[in-house]
Amino acid sequence: MKSSESYSAVILDLDGVLTDTRNLHYDAWKQTFDEYLRNYGQGPFSPKEYEQYVDGKPRSQGILDFLIFRGIPITSSELQKLGERKNKLYLSELDQYGLVVFSDALRSLKRWKERGVPLAVVSSSKNTSKILDRLGIRNYFNVEMNALKGEELHLQGKPSPDFFLEAARKLNKDPEECIVVEDAVSGIEAGIDGKFGSVIGIARPGQTGAKELSNAGADFVVNSLEEIFDLKPNLLKNWRRFAKFINGREMALFLDFDGTLSEIVPNHTEAQMVEEIRPILTRIAESIKVAIISGRDRQDVKARVGIDGVFYAGCHGYDISGPGCFHFQVEEAEIASEEMSEAIQKIEGLKNKYPDLSIEKKKYFTAVHYRQVPTSLHSKLENEIKNLIKDYKKLELRKGKMVLDLAPRLKWNKGEAVKKLCDVLDLEPGKTVAVYIGDDLTDEDVFCELQSWGVGIKVGIEGMAGTCSEYSLRSPSDVVTFLSKIEETFTRQEKQWRRGA
């Protein structure tokens, strides 16, 4: 499996990634701007404005972008005075409060250094060298790019990729060989523009959120630098490696539905397949064996996908149908039906306390959706449900994304369903490559099953720690691109298979 350690170099922003100077910068900017804004009768500088117009940019550029937003003109002499005042306030706060390296950052720096991974630090601050010395981490970096060096080389600041590209050049690496780690939207945009191998956003408490970093184009969003070691390479950026692995062998394509073929929506009943997928997948199914494996009831997912000639596995593979009148069910699941009915009644009683709880009854499962329940109540709700069903010996809880599945206590899951389908389709390991795409914890059973003879692809920008998948895709829109490449590259090579077989 390829992780972040397979990349040749790592380029890290300083403020907010390695140390918490972000709050000191914001306080200094706020004091500077608030005083200036009062002269124009305008309201105070806000955290949102810092995030959008100032964070991560060179000092002068941040001032100009913010004041343009506010519609306030400024002369070059005023621009210089504001920059000098901000820096003076920042250094004063730096002396007063001091700095520490984030503990996860220090452990990660040590780990990269031990493995001989070249490191660069990039910052739009003119105080970068002073901060690295105070933190005692200068010796970890092969290259330091700061505002002073940027001025010498006439480089543009973020969101331009100039600083990152210069860091890669000094490391003697091509951009696609490097990881960029940033906490600011402007830094993510710079990494994307520079076409780096992977652009990773870090969403620390009180800083730019995961959603904003994702919307800016981050390949992944992590909460700790240590999570980077578990990340999987984006398949679209590693297409040649994937295609080489297939190497002319037959392919079978297995896909999850929610979060893979459809976007995740607040209400599970409103999920729809991404419209561009249907015609592509219909054409692929003419020559490649395709199965949709979902936690939804089989008839439900079949209606939402609406493609003939593919296999549908509902209830995480307990109920499967396909071309040629094929139908398979795990009959043993019926033994849990009585306990299931009793448990559902108890769980429905919780709706008085949690009115946003949604209970979806299926043929063999019951899904308890809590996506719309306030986040602060999630742990309490999960514990209450666990206590309610603890005495039922024929039932178990399986956790997914904002859902708890009440399931029969049997050795059956999506991984077992894929093995069953492989038998039905006469797929032989070595001669066939099974490819599975999913986004949830329930998909891990398939990823682990395919480690030795297939390819697992996880959809999403978070939650990669511990996954058995080999590659990643950012979102269902990436799945569209992936399927288009499958059609273009492989369907001409595959023989049309008989749907009645």
Image (tube, rainbow, N blue to C red):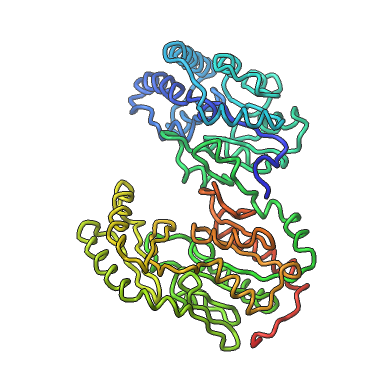
Q: Is 73 on the left or on the right of 142, as rendered?
A: left
Q: Quadrant of the C terminus?
A: bottom right
Q: Is residue 332 above or below residue 158?
A: below
At which x and y percent is residue 442? 49, 61
Viewer-closest of 320 and 124: 320
Height in image: 319 above or below 38? below
Residue plotted at (49% across, 57% down): 441
Residue in front for this viewpoint, 123 or 54: 123
Q: Residue at image x 58%, y 40%?
A: 228
* Residue 99: image location, x then y, percent: 48, 18
Does 231 sit above or below residue 292? Answer: above
Please give left or right for residue 229 compared with residue 331 in the image: right
Dividing the picture into quadrants, the one containing residue 323 is: bottom right
Q: Residue at x 42, y 67 (%)?
A: 409
| Residue extending furthest toward the left | 352
Q: Position of residue 45 (x, y in %)?
A: 38, 28
**Residue 57 is at least partly visible in this image:** no
Which residue corresponds to the image point at 54% horizontal and 53% vertical from the top-left?
A: 460
Label count reads: 0
Residue 445 at least partly seen: yes
Q: Where residue 87 appears, x then y in whole percent? A: 50, 15
**Is 279 situated above or below 46?**
below
Please give left or right for residue 179 compared with residue 208 in the image: right
